[in-house]
Amino acid sequence: MAGNSQRRGARQRGKGIGAQGRTAGSGGRPRKALEGKGPTPKAEDRVYHKAYRGKQASARRDLAGTGGRSAGLRSGPRTPKLGADWVVGRNPVWEALRAGVPVKVAYVAEGAERDDRLRDIFRFAADHAQPLLQITRAELDRLTGGAVHQGVALQVPPFAYADPQEVVDLALDQFDLAARAADDEAPLGPVIVACDHITDPHNLGAIIRSAAAFGAVGILLPQRRSAHVTAAVWKASAGAAAHLPVAQVTNLNQALVACAKAGFTVIGLAGDGDAVIAEAPTDEPIVLVVGAEDTGLSRLVREHCDVVARIPMSDTIESLNASVAVGVALYELRRF
């Protein structure tokens, strides 16, 4: 019957919360637990996780790479800009110092093992007042990009190229002075050496050395498809790059045209030249153009030459190294 509370499963009405025989509520604790504690931390931020230990070890390595100093308080060397030229290794550094390569900063690693070559470097630095900055090996590794430096390295400053017009004006001034001094005799014309596609730095360095040895006024280099004056060129020139102006031109063909208009005779060196270099005129300003050993003078450069001359030699040899050819040609043009 309706309202019968005795049936099976029926609940007794009228007994609310807190009545006798009822269990206590949870007070909302389960709901609070479900609210969570924010996003789960990354593995590397959990101190009990192995990723955390790996992160700490990496931070210690980074700190060792800066010599233990913060970036804002560093008193040691700063990372060089991209493109900085370096000489690394004990023998290369020793040869560069002896050749007179300009040095921006010289570094030696702390605890570097002393041998005869390193003692030579120390002695040279002391005799020539060249400071050696001592840094950690890790820092030297970072500065040199992981190169095999053997505990010593030199940072070489960018080469200061001369202005092409200044080289031309210098040659013309020398010619005027020689003409006044010679009176009625024909003066010996100055020579500028122009390089066409010389991409080997050792070849360029040797050309600069030969040019300086035989009294050339300067060197003209194209900005593109040519070796630039780097530490390797300094070494190959045996320091001659410090005494001979080297200029870069945007376009070698246009530079040759400008020289011709200024009164220079443009002579190109080629194995199949129509003239012999010994027959070239020596009483006027000259631009001597040398091409790469394998390809020779480029077509346009050849077209801008007033004379294409050859060096007579045995039929058993097809061509000379570019620097050797320049040395022979300059000897003939200067007629010492």
Image (cartoon, rainbow, N blue to C red):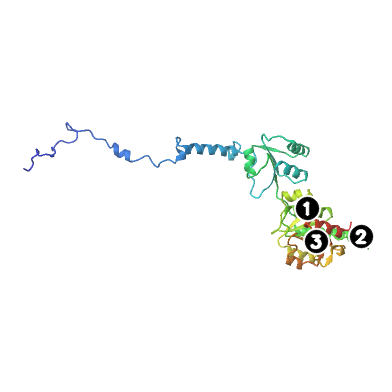
- Residue 189's x, y, as percent? 86, 61
Of badges 3 and 1, nearer the viewer stands 1
Q: Which residue is mark 2?
A: 182
User: What residue type is disc 1 on?
Assistant: Ala
The answer to whether any part of residue 61 appears in the image is yes
Residue 206's disc number: 1
Give the secondary structure at mark 3: strand
Q: Nearer the viewer, residue 128 or 211?
A: 211
Q: Nearer the viewer, residue 225 or 243?
A: 225
Q: Residues within 10 Å of mark 3 (few under 14, many from 20)?
A: many
Q: First in sequence, mark 3 or 1: give its number.
A: 1
Q: Which residue is mark 3?
A: 288
Q: Residues within 10 Å of mark 2 (few under 14, many from 20)?
A: few
Give the secondary structure at mark 1: helix
Q: Nearer the viewer, residue 321 or 224?
A: 321
> Label 2 to label 3, Cα distance in Å?
23 Å
Quadrant assignment for the N terminus: top left
Q: Nearer the viewer, residue 3 or 116?
A: 116
User: What residue type is disc 3 on?
Assistant: Leu
Q: Is residue 148 left or right of residue 129?
A: left
**Residues marked 3 and 1 touching at CB (< 8 Å):** no
Residue at the (75%, 48%) spot, across then down: 235
Please identify the quarter of the rendering in which residue 303 is found.
Answer: bottom right
- Residue 103's x, y, as percent? 72, 44
